[in-house]
Amino acid sequence: MNGLIIKKNANLFTVYSEDNFYNLAARGNLKKQGLFVGDNVEFDKVIDKICARKNLLIRPPLANLDKLFIVVAPIPKPDFLLVDKMLVYCYTNGIEPIIVVNKSDIASSQFLSEIDEIYSKVTKIIKISTKKGELTALKDQIQGICTLAGQSAVGKSSIINSLLGSRVCEVGDLSTKVQRGKQTTRLVELFKFGDGFLADTAGFSMLDLAYVVDLQPRELSTYYPDFLEFRAFCKFSSCLHASRDKCGIIEGVKNGEISKVRYQNYLKLLQQLKEAQKF
C-alpha cells in the first residue's frame, strides 16, 4: 500500500492512506536513511520503501513541501529579513511561497500598503483575520502539503486551530515588553484539511540561510524575481549588485522600481553567504 507519513514519534510513524491511519515501524535499512514527516512511502505490516522526494527540509524536518505560508502581522513588527530568507529558501527548494497577513482587522492602511509595496511584485499576498474568522482566502490556497511559518506570536498555531475547528496546536503568549512570542511548537505534524495537509513548524522562526541552502553569493540575485529584468542592464556579468557602477539593480533601487527594503535585505544575505564561505 502507499501512504503519507503525517507524524513521527520515536521509532513509530503514523501513515495516512485512503482515509485510514496506521501506526507503523520501518525496516532497519530505512531508519539509517532517515524517514521524515511528509514522506510518501510503501508499506504492508511495516514501512518498506521511501518514494522519491520533491524536496527535503532539515530545519524543520519535513519532506515534499508544496506551499509555504509566510505569516506576518502588524504585531509583532514584521521581520522582513526573515521573510526574504524564507522566500529564497522556497525558491531554492521548489516550494511556492505565499505571504499571509494575519490580524488584518487591526492592521492600518499604512501597514497593508507597506506589505504590498515590498512584496506585490514578488509573490501572492493574502489577508486574513483569525480573530474574526476571516480565513477563506487561506482555505482556498491549501493544496498538497502546506506549512505555516514566521515569527512567534504572528498567529500560526491559532490559524491551524481555527481552520481545523479544534485545539490541535498550543498557542503562546506575546510579551508586551519586547513584542515577541514564546515558541510553543516542538514537533512537526501534518493535519488533514480538505484535499491538503497543514503543518505547524518551529524551525522557520530562526533561519540561517547560509547553512540551510547550498548557495553561492553570485547566485543569490537569481532568487529575487523582482531583480530579474534589471540584471540585464549590469555592465559586468559577474556583478554582485553591491557597489559597482552601471549596475541595473542599483539603478532600479535609485529609481524606485525595486524596493529599498528588499535590496537592503539582499545585501545582508549576500554578506552572510560570503562570511559562510570563509569557514
Image: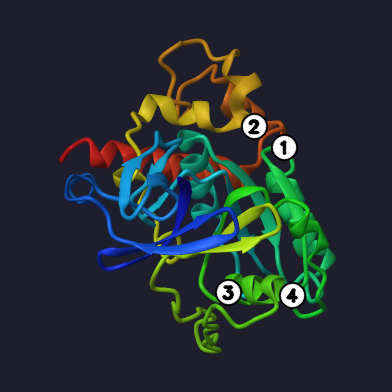
Cα distance in 3D space between marks 3 and 4 = 10 Å
Mark 3 or 1 closer to N-term?
A: 1
The residue positioned 32% from the left and 41% from the top of the image is 49
Placement of 73 over or under 61, stated as above or below: below
Tell me the residue that label 4 is attached to. Answer: 130
Q: Quadrant of residue 153?
A: bottom right
Badge 4 crowding class, 10 Å Cα cut-off, few under 14, some 14 to 19, many 20 or more, is some
Nearer to us: label 2 or label 3? 3
In percent of width and height, residue 225 lies at 61, 30
C-alpha span from label 2 to label 3: 31 Å
Q: Dot 2 surroundings within 10 Å: few (below 14), some, or many (20 or more)?
A: many
Q: Comparing marks 4 and 1, which lies closer to the viewer?
A: 4
In contact (CB < 8 Å): disc 3 and disc 1 = no
Q: Secondary structure at mark 3?
A: helix
Relative side of 75 to 207, left or right: right
The residue located at (51%, 73%) in the rendering is 152
State the residue in front, 112 or 131. 131
Q: Give the camera-side residue of 11 and 229.
A: 11
Report crowding for label 3: few under 14, some 14 to 19, many 20 or more residues within 10 A (C-alpha): many
Query: Marks 2 and 1, Cα distance to the nearest angstrom?
Result: 6 Å
Identify the secondary structure beneath mark 4.
Answer: loop
Residue 155 position, x and y percent, is 62, 74
Q: Which residue is mark 3?
A: 157
User: Which comes sooner in the sequence, label 3 or label 4?
Assistant: 4
**Vertical side of 259 occupied by 72: above or below:** below
Q: CA distance from mark 3 to mark 1?
A: 28 Å
Type of amino acid at the residue the image marks with label 3? Ser
- Whichever of labels 4 and 2 marks the residue nearer the N terminus, that label is 4
